[in-house]
Image (cartoon, grey):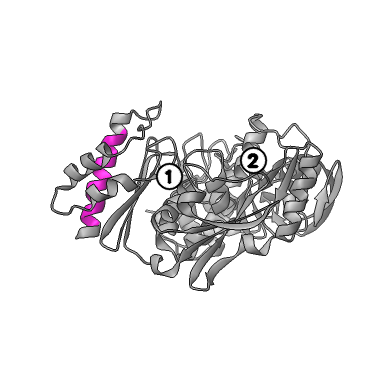
């Protein structure tokens, strides 16, 4: 049995780099990635599991990092927006105007990355259900949906 | 950010989990069992709860199991909702779970956490209420099993220091015809005004709802009226509601009258679907 109390050192494999960080067991993965590791692309939004600005991948599974304690994912492989290598997806967001202020964009990109890894053949309903996990307060939803379709090789008209 | 400190335990067995809980309780740490943690992290940040210790159940094999064992589907309490959605061996459960929270949150939110949580909706219990599921618990007094109607009465009936290990559903219930309808106030990712699950089992209509009363309920007293196929659906809905003593939820999301209206619409559609 693992037991963490007080300040403890955990190991996180983030974007293929190993980080040993000292955390409190109550620290969320979001805060550790940003404040202890220094990767600020994962955004703080509602910290309530609603907005998806903090979305990243844990062992390939799309996850809202504000709802996970860092100690829960000790030893797992984490991918943040800084480690996203899918240029086709990023280009699609640019081509289709998939962002306005850009604050929600890293969360949307990580969610879309997980969706595209899951299946290359996406239905409109599947895209809609997945994108419902994130909020864009600029309300640029149509551009985001078009970008995901373009990245999946679908027509966007 | 969670402002208070806590002790985190990650047991590998049920016995270790119980021992960890007892150790933390003996230190006055007010421990909680941790499933997906979606509620604990958000309520902790908001200051609504302040557990001094968390016992993570996700690595315990019995809590993570999902498959047929001895003629029953065993669903571990720490199984994420998306697992049952993406592998729909129990379609009624898959459909209900697919409507809870959003797709990303469902990767963390667990079946046991949804049922045992503080949020009153606990929709994952609806299929279990209809199909005579068995709930397995573990705690300081050992292990025990209970039928759903004993184990869940609006909320999970846990003894001190106990946790839900798994829910078991007899195979004969897995492929029953079902109808699920969920209505929200402001889009799909919202709490339900009415989440209704109907099934026809051995010639009788069974119905369970969440969001309609203060807590999820099976409408057992009203099912006799619902099963009277000689009466129109609207009349059956009225008769079923009249047979219930529970007060319909009336809050800022929707009035009781509006919820009753939605209930009637869903019931009419559901009866038509199940009866052809």
Name which residue lies at 73% across and 52% down. B18
- Is residue B85 inside the magenta stretch? no
The residue at which mark 1 appears reads as: A142
Graded by Cα atoms within 10 Å as few (under 14), some (14 to 19) or many (20 or more), the crowding at tag 1 reads few
Residue furthest to the bottom in view is B70
Q: Is residue B64 placed above or below B268 in the rendered structure?
A: below
The chain holding disc 2 is B
Picture mark count: 2
The chain holding disc 1 is A
C-alpha distance separating marks 1 and 2? 34 Å
Question: Magenta region's main secondary structure?
Answer: helix
Chain part drawn in magenta: B259-273
Residue B74 horizontal/vertical position (percent): 54, 65
Helix or strand or loop: what does disc 1 sit on?
helix
Helix or strand or loop: what does disc 2 sit on?
helix
Which quarter of the picture shows residue B136?
A: bottom right
The residue at which mark 2 appears reads as: B40
Q: Is residue A143 placed above or below A85 in the rendered structure?
A: above
């Amino acid at each position: 049995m693992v037991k963490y109390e007080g300040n403890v050192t955990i190991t996180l494999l983030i974007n293929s780099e190993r980080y040993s960080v000292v955390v409190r067991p109550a620290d969320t993965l979001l805060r550790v990635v940003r404040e202890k590791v220094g990767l600020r692309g994962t955004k703080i939004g509602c910290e309530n599991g609603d907005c998806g600005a903090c979305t990243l991948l844990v062992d390939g599974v799309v996850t809202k990092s504000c709802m996970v304690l860092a100690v829960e994912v000790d030893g797992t492989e984490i991918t943040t927006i800084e480690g996203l290598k899918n240029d086709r997806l990023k280009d699609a967001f640019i081509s289709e105007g998939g962002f306005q202020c850009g604050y929600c964009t890293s969360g949307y990109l990580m969610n879309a990355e997980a969706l595209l890894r899951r299946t290359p053949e996406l239905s409109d309903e599947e895209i809609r259900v997945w994108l419902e996990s994130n909020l864009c307060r600029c309300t640029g939803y149509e551009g985001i949906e078009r970008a995901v379709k373009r990245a999946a090789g679908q027509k966007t008209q | 950010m969670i402002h208070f400190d806590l002790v985190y335990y990650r047991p590998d067995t049920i016995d270790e989990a119980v021992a960890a809980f007892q150790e933390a309780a003996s230190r006055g740490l007010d421990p909680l069992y941790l499933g997906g943690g979606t509620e604990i992290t958000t309520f902790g940040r908001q200051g609504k709860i302040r557990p001094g210790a968390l016992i993570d159940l996700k690595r315990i094999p019995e809590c993570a199991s999902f498959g047929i064992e001895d003629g029953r589907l065993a669903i571990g309490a720490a199984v994420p909702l998306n697992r049952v959605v993406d592998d729909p061996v129990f379609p009624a459960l898959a459909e209900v779970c697919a409507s809870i929270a959003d797709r990303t949150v469902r990767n963390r939110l667990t079946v046991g956490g949804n049922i045992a949580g503080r949020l009153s909706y606990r929709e994952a219990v609806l299929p279990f209420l209809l199909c005579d599921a068995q709930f397995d618990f573990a705690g300081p007094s050992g292990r025990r099993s209970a039928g759903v109607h004993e184990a869940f009465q609006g909320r999970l009936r846990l003894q001190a220091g106990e946790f839900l290990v798994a829910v078991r559903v007899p195979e004969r219930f897995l492929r029953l015809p079902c109808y699920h309808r969920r209505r929200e106030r402001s889009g799909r990712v919202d709490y339900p005004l009415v989440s209704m699950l109907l099934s026809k089992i051995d010639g009788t209509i069974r119905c369970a709802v969440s969001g309609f009363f203060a807590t999820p309920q099976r409408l057992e007293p009203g099912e006799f009226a619902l099963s009277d196929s000689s009466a129109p659906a609207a009349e059956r809905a009225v008769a079923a509601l009249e047979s219930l003593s529970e007060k319909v939820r009336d809050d800022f999301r929707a009035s009781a009258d509006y919820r009753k209206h939605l209930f009637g619409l869903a019931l009419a559609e559901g009866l038509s679907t199940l009866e052809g």
